[in-house]
């Protein structure tokens, strides 16, 4: 038998079944970290598609928030413009009424 055959069931070197996770578990326990299969899969690069999806969802949420904030600013600006236009019209109406009253006197 070759040396590889002897190492295939050695948990310290084998890379099949759950041996890599068990090594990760020992590392986490030694470091005092919580053991998580999900985190191990992320670290091992087995969840790249899921990570990319999560990042795209987060980016889409950020873009949506920015668009909503821009829309609110635009609405507020439009409302302020309308208020000032109404105030200007009111001032013009008051001035024309005063001018009309002064002419009548």
Image: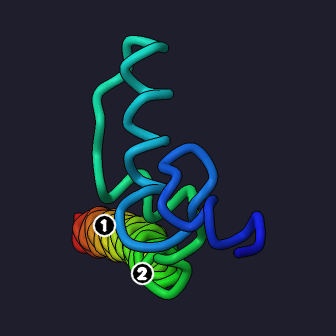
Residue 30 vertical placement versus 13 (above, below): above
Quarter containing the N terminus: bottom right
Q: Earlier in the sequence, mark 2 or mark 1?
A: 2
Residue located at (48% from left, 73% from top): 16
The residue that label 1 is drawn on is: 83
* Dot label at residue 50: 2
Q: Nearer the viewer, residue 61 or 44?
A: 44
Determine the secondary structure under disc 1. Answer: helix
Q: Position of residue 43 (x, y in %)?
A: 56, 56
Q: CA distance from mark 2 to mark 1?
A: 49 Å
Q: Is residue 62 visible?
A: yes
Coordinates of residue 44 in the picture (x, y in percent): 57, 63
Element type where label 2 sits in the image = helix
Specify the quadrant that holds the C terminus.
bottom left
Taking depth in this image into account, of 50 and 95 the one nearest to the observer is: 50
Disc assigned to residue 44? none
Q: Is residue 102 above or below residue 1?
A: above
At a point 29% along the width and 27% down the height, the residue shown is: 34
For residue 99, say whether it is visible: no
Closer to the camera, 9 or 57?
9
């Amino acid at each position: 038998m070759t040396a590889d055959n002897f190492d295939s069931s050695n948990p310290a070197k084998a890379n099949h079944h759950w041996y890599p996770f068990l090594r990760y578990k020992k590392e986490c326990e030694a470091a005092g970290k919580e053991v998580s299969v999900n985190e191990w899969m992320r670290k091992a690069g087995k969840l790249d598609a899921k990570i990319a999806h999560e990042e795209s969802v987060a980016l889409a949420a950020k873009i949506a928030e920015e668009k909503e904030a821009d829309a609110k600013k635009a609405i507020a600006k439009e409302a302020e413009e309308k208020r000032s236009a109404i105030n200007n019209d009111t001032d013009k109406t008051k001035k024309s009424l005063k001018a009309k009253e002064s002419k009548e006197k």
